Image (cartoon, rainbow, N blue to C red):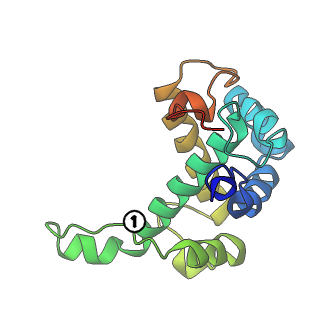
Amino acid sequence: MLRIQLDDRAVFLERWQALLVGLLDRASVAQHPARAAMLEQVVRWEARASETSVGYRLVRVFHKTLERRVFEALTLPVRAAHPNLQLQVPSQLEEAVWQLANARPAHLLDPRFVDWREFLLDVLDESLRTVASECSDPTLASCTWGARTPPVSNIR
């Protein structure tokens, strides 16, 4: 049981890290120092939710932001017709968002964007703004997972 509790591997987020690295290509980081800093940290991630990992935090924030933004785009007509309706991002959205992020069907794209790449880069930039609001380091080097979620204790 202790091994399970101490397992900090980020197997679940590995595919999201690869997607993020692919999105942070030369064209997307040119003239964008924050994106370049993100790329540096995401490439070096340890695939662990360790307290010293900046990459884990960035991938996780991107993943959660993308889930929320896809849900908002898909429910836009319902929310417009029923402005008082309170919708929550369902916990079972993972696979659907993954399929959309890879297949990128034009008919399911948020109508404010020209293509999925533009949408995904906007999600990426929102993720950076979220981390920046919690951590004032422009290099992101001190924006670790532990700084966001301090360890409860060190049981060993």
Q: Quadrant of residue 58?
A: top right
For the point 68% across and 49% down, the residue is 8
For the point 69% across and 54% down, the residue is 3
Q: Amino acid at mark 1?
A: Glu
Give the quarter of the figure containing the C terminus: top right
Inspect this view and state whether residue 117 appears. yes
Where residue 30 appears, as percent x and y from the top left, is: 79, 34
> Image check: 109 left or right of 9?
left
Numbered-mark total: 1
For the point 43% across and 69% down, the residue is 71
Where residue 37 appears, as percent x and y from the top left, is: 74, 29
Residue position marked by numbered label 1 in the rendering: 72
Give the quarter of the figure containing the N terminus: bottom right
> Image check: 156 left or right of 79?
right
Q: Is residue 8 above or below residue 88?
A: above
- In front of the other: 115 or 92: 92
For the point 53% across and 23% down, the residue is 135
- In front of the other: 34 or 54: 54
Crowding at label 1, few (<14), some or many (≥20) Cα neighbours within 10 Å?
some
Q: Residue furthest top?
A: 137
Where residue 61 appears, as percent x and y from the top left, is: 56, 47
